[in-house]
Amino acid sequence: MRIAVFPGSFDPITLGHYDIVERAAPLFDKIIIAIGQNSQKKYMFSLEQRKEFIQKTFKDFPNVEVDSFEGLTIDYCQSKKVNFILRGLRNPADFEFEKAIAQTNRTLTHDNKIETIFLLTSAGKSFISSSIVREIISFKGHYELLVPDSVRV
């Protein structure tokens, strides 16, 4: 079975995230959208809210499930016996950062290789980031064009 983990904080999920999952869904038997938790980080939305946003967004995708984890993504993948990590790339800076993580993950899993699969975000969505959306929300701006309908505050 081809199972991919799509890790992130998803604070909140954006149309860029949606674009990646929608395009990856036919490529994998299952995609686990894994919400990483970092006790040092301040989130705008609670874990429960983020899970709900994602579950509502992908309710019509039978091969997409939502989970959460703490710690290293690679440890989570190994605990789930997953061989693929799905990542979206918006720009060259994303590529350099994600490449370093992917190479580190391959080193850390020496005998049980976990491959990172990169998808380029569609051009019309490549400018969207959760941090930009949070900023717009905090100033009561019109963020609705950047997120799935399930994200309403």
Image (cartoon, grey):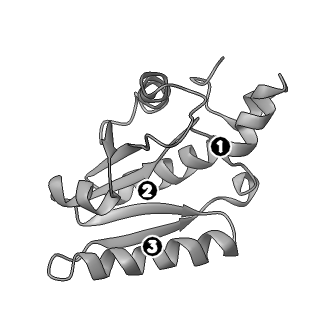
The residue depicted at 59 percent of the width and 78 percent of the height is 96
Question: Residue 90 placed where, x, y %?
Answer: 66, 63
Please tell me how many numbered marks the rendered image carries: 3
In the rendering, at what x and y percent does residue 151 appear? Answer: 60, 25
Q: In the figure, is residue 110 to the left or right of 133?
A: left
Residue 101: assigned label = 3
Q: CA distance from mark 2 to mark 1?
A: 20 Å
**The N terminus lies in quadrant:** bottom left
Residue 24's mark? Answer: 2
The residue tagged with tag 2: helix, strand or loop?
helix
From this view, report whether residue 3 is shown above or below residue 134.
Answer: below
Residue 147 occupies quadrant: top right
| Mark 1 burial class by Cα count in 10 Å: few <14, some 14-19, many 20+ | some
Left or right: 30, with 7 as reference point: left
Q: Position of residue 6 (x, y in %)?
A: 40, 53
Residue 40 drawn above or below residue 127: above
In the picture of the structure, the residue carrying the numbered disc 1 is: 130
Q: Who comes first in sequence, dot 2 or dot 1?
A: 2
Query: Does label 3 or label 2 sit earlier along the sequence?
Result: 2
Q: Whole-percent x and y of residue 103?
A: 40, 81
